[in-house]
Amino acid sequence: MLGRTAGGLFWMFRYLERCENTSRLVEAGFRIALTRNTAAEQEWMSVLDTADVRKAYDDRYSGYNGENVINFLLRDRSHPASVNSMAEAARTNARAVRTALTREVFEAVNENYLILRDALAQPVRDRDLPAVLNTIRQQSALVRGALHGTMLRNDIYDFARLGTFLERADNTARILDVKYYVLLPSVAHVGAALDNVQWETILRALSSLRAYRWLTQDKMTAQGIGEFLILDKRLPRSLAFCSAAITSNLGEIAKEYGEETPSTQLAIENETRLTSKPIEKIMEFGLHETLDAFIRSNNTLAEQIERDYRFNE
Amino acid sequence: MSDRPDFYDEMRDADLTPHAPYQRYHAWITNEDESRLRAKAQEAERMFRRTGITFNVYGDPDATDRLIPFDIVPRIIGATEWSRLTRGIEQRVRAINAFLHDLYHRQEIIKAGRVPLDLIRRNVALLPQMIGVSPPGGVYTHIVGVDIVRTGPGDFFALEDNVRTPSGVSYMLENRETMLQIFPELFAAIPVREVSHYPKALRRSLAACAPAAAHGEPTVAVLTPGVYNSAYFEHAFLADQMGVELVEGSDLRVVNGRIAMRTTRGYTPIDVLYRRIDDDFLDPLTFRPDSMLGAPGAMDIYRAGGITLANAPGAGIADDKAIYSYMPDIVEFYTGETAILKNVPTWRCAEPDALRYVLAHLAEVVVKEVHGSGGYGMLVGPAATKQERADFAEKLKANPEAYIAQPTLALSTVPIFTEAGLAPRHVDLRPFVLVSPERIEIIPGGLTRVAMKEGSLVVNSSQGGGTKDTWVLEE
C-alpha cells in the first residue's frame, strides 16, 4: 500500500470521527443552554475549549452565544474543523484513496458529504438542530457500517481504524480535561444539582449517559464517572478502549508486515501507563495531569505512525 | 435541423422503419411506457451521482460535482459493421506504431517523400529525447482511442487518433453497468457483447510490455496528476479495477536505477507505468522543470530500459492534426494496403491555397487547433455567428500553421430520450484499442458521445455533450 494512501485513510477517518464528536458536543452544549440560561455563555465557551478551537472562534466572532458557536462548529467553511469542512475533507481524501475503499464505503462517504452539505446549506434553526445533529451521527454510522461490513481486515482497515481511535481518544480526553474540575473531590458534593448537570453533560457528550446509568443503577459519583470514561474497557469511547484498539491495530499491521515499528512499542507504552493506575490514584494524584499527559502522548503516537508508515515524503 | 433527412439516423429511416441492428430494441422501446422510462432515466442519474462519477470542468466553481449527462437509449452496432470497423482500426493502429518507430529511427517515410520533412522538423510533438530509443516490446501506443464518425450506412470516418492518454473508457464500463442494472430484461433478449473485461485486458496488455529490468510478475501502476484532474475518477477507477496502485508524482522516487513508489513498507520498483499525464509533465529533469506531477529522472531510466511508460513519450506526434491528413499515405506506406477507414478531407492552413479556401468558406467548415483537444479553441462554421467567424478569421491569419480545417460532416444521429419522447441527436464513437507485442485487441463497444442539444455537432463533454452505452451485437 502507498504511504500516501495510508495517510489518506487515517485522516479521512479522523475527520469523520471528529464530525461525529462535534455533533455530540454541540448537542450537550445546546441542552445546557436550553435548561440553564444563565450558564449558557460559560457552557459554549467550554464547548469551544473542548474542541480546541476557541482562538479560531475569537478571530471570527465576539461573544459566546449559541447561534454563533453552532454556526462556527457546524457550518463555517472558513473554519477547517467545522463539520461542513471536515465532511468535504473526508470526501476529498476518499477520492484520493478511492482504490483502497470498497464501493460501499466510498458511496457512504460521498453521501455523507452530499447530505451534510444540503443539511448545513442554511444556518440551522434551533428547532431543526436536533434533527441535523442526528443526521451527522447517522451518516457517520453508515460509513462505519459499510467499513465493517465490506472491507477486508488488512492494513487498509487498520489504518482507517487507527485514525478513528486516535481521534476518539483525543476527544474523550479533551472533554474530560475541560471539565475535570467538576470531577475533583474538593468540589464534588454528592447529589448536588449543579454537579449532576455537569456530570450528565460529560456523559452526554460521549453518548454514554444511558450506559452509565444502566451499569450503576443511576448512582452517580465523580470517581465512578472518571473510572467509566477513562478505564472501562466495555465502553467504546473510553480512553482504555481506544488505547487497546490502537495497540491492537498497530499489532495487526506489524504482524502483516512481519516487522514492528517504533509506534508499535509506543502504543503499548501509552496503554500500559494509562491502565496501570487504579482510578483512586488517578483522581488523587492529578486528573488534569493524567489527561494532559495522555493527550500529548496520543499526539506523539500519531506523529510516530505517520513517520513509520511513510504517510509523507 | 437534425430532423432533416440529410442526416443518417442509425436507429430508423424517416418513415420510422428500424434498421436491422435496432429491430428488437425498437420494438421494445416503442411499446414501453414513457413514465417508466422517465423513472429509469432518473434512477440512472441517481446511480451516477451516488458512485461519484463526475467530470471536472476546468474553470467551473462547482467543478467536482458535474455529471456527464447519460442517455438511456443505447447506440447499437451490428456484427458486420463492427467487424469492418475493427479491421480498419487495427490496420490504422498498426500503421501508427510503425510510423512512430520509423520517425524516431530511420525516417524512411520522409526519405520516400510521403510525409514532408518540414512537418516533422518543426513539430513540437516530436520529442528529440526519443530519437533512437526503442520502447520495450516495440510498442508506442499501448492504449488508443480512435474517434469515429459516421455519415451513412457504410460510411465511417476516422476523425482523430488519440494516442497520448485517451480518456473515457470508465464511462464505457459504467454506462454498461448502469444499463445492466436498470434494463436487465434487454440484455436477456438482445445478444450484446461484453465490455467488462477491459480492465483485465488492459493489465494483461500492459504487463506484456514489461521492460528488461522486470523480474517475475510485472508491477503495474497508474500515474495520475491527482484528485483535482478532470479525469481523476477514471484514473482511480482503472487502477482499482486492475488491482494496481494509483500513484502521484510525490509517491515516486528513483531508487537503485528504478522508478519506485513509496509504500508503507518502503520503496517498491514499478515495471510498467500507465501514465495519465502529458509528456511535458513526465520528468521535470527532462521536460518542464516546474512540473510537480511526474518523476524526476523517469526519462533516463526509461531510456535505460528500467521502466515501460504507456503510452510512450513522443507518441503524440502521431495524433497531431497536421499529421492526420497524411494518414492514408502512412497506412499505405507501412501496411502496403489501402486504408480501410476513411479520412476526413483536411485543409492544412499552413498552405497558402488551403488558407485562402478556408477563409472564403468559414461558414461551411470546422476549424481546429493543430495541438488542441477537448473541443476547446475550435470553430464550427455553420453554428458560429458572423462576429465569431470574423474574430476567428483574424486568429487564423495571424497564425495559420496552428490550424487545420475540415468540411462540416453530416454526423449520424441516434435518438435520445427527452421530455417529448425520442429525438435524434448527433453522435460519435470512441472504441478503445489495446496494443501489446502479442496482439492488438479492440474492445467490442466504446464510448458513444452525443450532443445533447438539438442540431449541435459538438459532442465533447467539456462542451455539454453526453454519453450513451454502446452495444456491439454478437454475430
Image (spheres, rainbow, N blue to C red):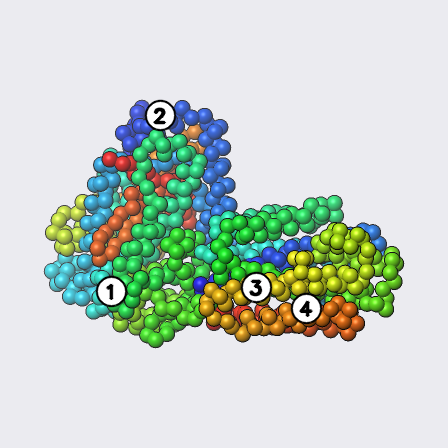
Both marks 3 and 4 on one chain: yes
Both marks 2 and 4 on one chain: no
Instruction: Please state, as top left, top right, bottom left or bottom right, where the C terminus of chain B lies in the image.
Output: top left
- At label 3, the amino acid type is Ser
- Residue A121 vs B107, above or below: the answer is above
Q: Residue at x 65, y 57 (%)?
A: A236
Q: Nearer the viewer, residue B49 or A121?
A: B49
Both marks 2 and 1 on one chain: yes
Can you tell which quarter of the image residue B464 is in?
A: top left
First in sequence: mark 3 vs mark 4: 3
Q: Residue at x 42, y 34 (%)?
A: B183
Between the residue at mark 1 and the residue at mark 4, the CA separation in whole angstroms equals 61 Å
Between the residue at mark 2 and the residue at mark 1, the CA separation in whole angstroms equals 51 Å
Q: Nearer the viewer, residue A68 or B359?
A: A68
Q: Residue at x 54, y 74 (%)?
A: A262
- Find disc 2 in the rendering and name its residue: B27
Q: Nearer the viewer, mark 3 or mark 1?
A: 3
Q: Nearer the viewer, mark 2 or mark 4?
A: 4
Instruction: Please state, as top left, top right, bottom left or bottom right, where the N terminus of chain B lies in the image.
Output: top left
Q: Residue at x 40, y 68 (%)?
A: B261
The chain to which mark 1 is attached is: B
Q: Residues within 10 Å of mark 3 (few under 14, many from 20)?
A: some
Q: Is residue B295 left or right of residue A83?
A: left
Both marks 1 and 4 on one chain: no
- Find disc 4 in the rendering and name its residue: A275
- Find disc 3 in the rendering and name its residue: A248
x, y percent for residue A108: 54, 49
Element carrying mark 3:
helix
- At label 2, the amino acid type is Ala
- Find disc 1 in the rendering and name its residue: B135
Q: Are marks 1 and 4 in contact (CB under 8 Å)?
A: no
